[in-house]
Amino acid sequence: MLFSLTANADEAQVRKSLSEAMPGLKLSSVEMSEIVGMYRVTTYSGEALFVSSDGKFFLTGDLYATKTGRIENLTEKRRETARIEQISSVQGKDKIVFPAKGETKARIAVFTDIDCGYCRKLHREIPALNDMGIEVSYLAYPRAGVGSDSYGKYVSAWCAEDKLEAMTDAKNGKSIPEKTCANPVQDQYMLGQAMGISGTPAIVLESGRLIPGYLNAQKLGKALGVL
C-alpha cells in the first residue's frame, strides 16, 4: 500500500514537472520503467521519455537491454504492441481493403496519401501482393492535413460506391467524382499522428512492426514470410 501511494505521488510529480516545463506537451501515459527510479512517459505522438521520479531529469530515445548475448530494443517492442492495439481499434468497415486471392497468408495495414508518389508506386504492387495471399488495408493519412486537396480526394474515394475502383483511379492520377458522406478519414489521420506516423506510405505488419516507406512486393513478401 505504501509503495502504491509513493508511486502515485511520484507519477503526479512527473506529470507536474513536465507540464510546467513544457506546457504544450500532451502525455499519453506515465508508468514505471525497467530502470529503477525512472518513469516511462509516452507522449501523444508516440515519443518516449524517461523521467526521474522527482521530475527533475529526463532522457529521450529508445531503451535497450542486453539479454543472453543479444541486444533488445524494449521501447520498440512496446511500440509494436501499441501499434497492434491501435490498428485493431479500426473497424473493418472503416478500411479500404484489397483482399488476398485464395488463402490469406498475411495482412498489412498501410497509412496512405493519394497524392504521394511512393504510395502510388506501392499501389501498383497490390495485385502481386494479393496473388501472394497478402491482404492490404488502407488507412487514410493525407500528409497535408485535414481539409487539404489530398484529404478531399480520400473522402471521395471512401464515399464512392466502389471504393477499390475509386482508390485505384485516384492513385493513377485520374479525376474521380467528388463525394462526401460520414467517413473515418479524419479519425484515421489523427490515429496516424498518435502513432508517430510522419510520412507515407507507412506499412504496419501484423507483428506491430512498422516499415516506413516503399518496399516492392518481393521484399514485402519476404518480410512477411510468405516467400
Image: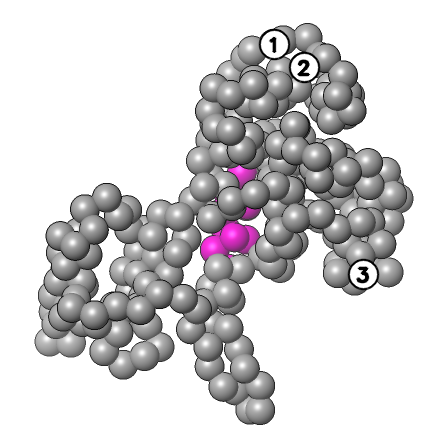
Q: CA distance from mark 2 to mark 1?
A: 7 Å
Residue at image x 53%, y 33%? 143
Labelled pair 2, 1 in contact (Cβ < 8 Å): yes
* Kind of element beneath mark 2: loop
Which amino acid does the dot numbered 3 rest on? Lys
Query: In the current view of this chain or complex, which residue is farthest to the bottom?
Result: 69
Q: Taken as a whole, is the magenta stretch helix, strand or loop?
A: helix
Q: Is residue 138 magenta?
A: no
Q: Is residue 130 visible?
A: no
Q: Position of residue 88 (x, y in %)?
A: 55, 46
Q: Residue at x 82, y 41 (%)?
A: 125
Residue topped by disc 1: 179
Label 2: few (<14), some (14–19) or many (≥20) C-alpha neighbours in 10 Å = some
* Kind of residue at badge 1: Lys
Q: SS at mark 3?
A: helix
Q: Is residue 87 magenta?
A: yes
Rendered location of residue 112, percent (x, y): 63, 36
| Mark 2 or mark 1, earlier in chain | 2
SS for dot 1: loop
Query: CA separation, marks 3 and 1?
Result: 38 Å
Residue position marked by numbered label 2 in the rendering: 160
Give coordinates of residue 14: x percent, y percent: 18, 62
Residue ID at (42%, 73%): 63
- Per the rendered image, the range of residues in magenta is 81-90
Residue placed most toward the observer, 48 or 30: 48
Question: Of callouts 3 and 1, which one flags the residue occurring earlier in the amino acid sequence?
Answer: 1
Of the image marks 2 and 3, the number of the one nearer the N terminus: 2
Residue that extends furthest to the front in the rendered view of this protein: 117
Residue displayed at 80% across by 49% down: 216
Residue identifier under label 3: 222
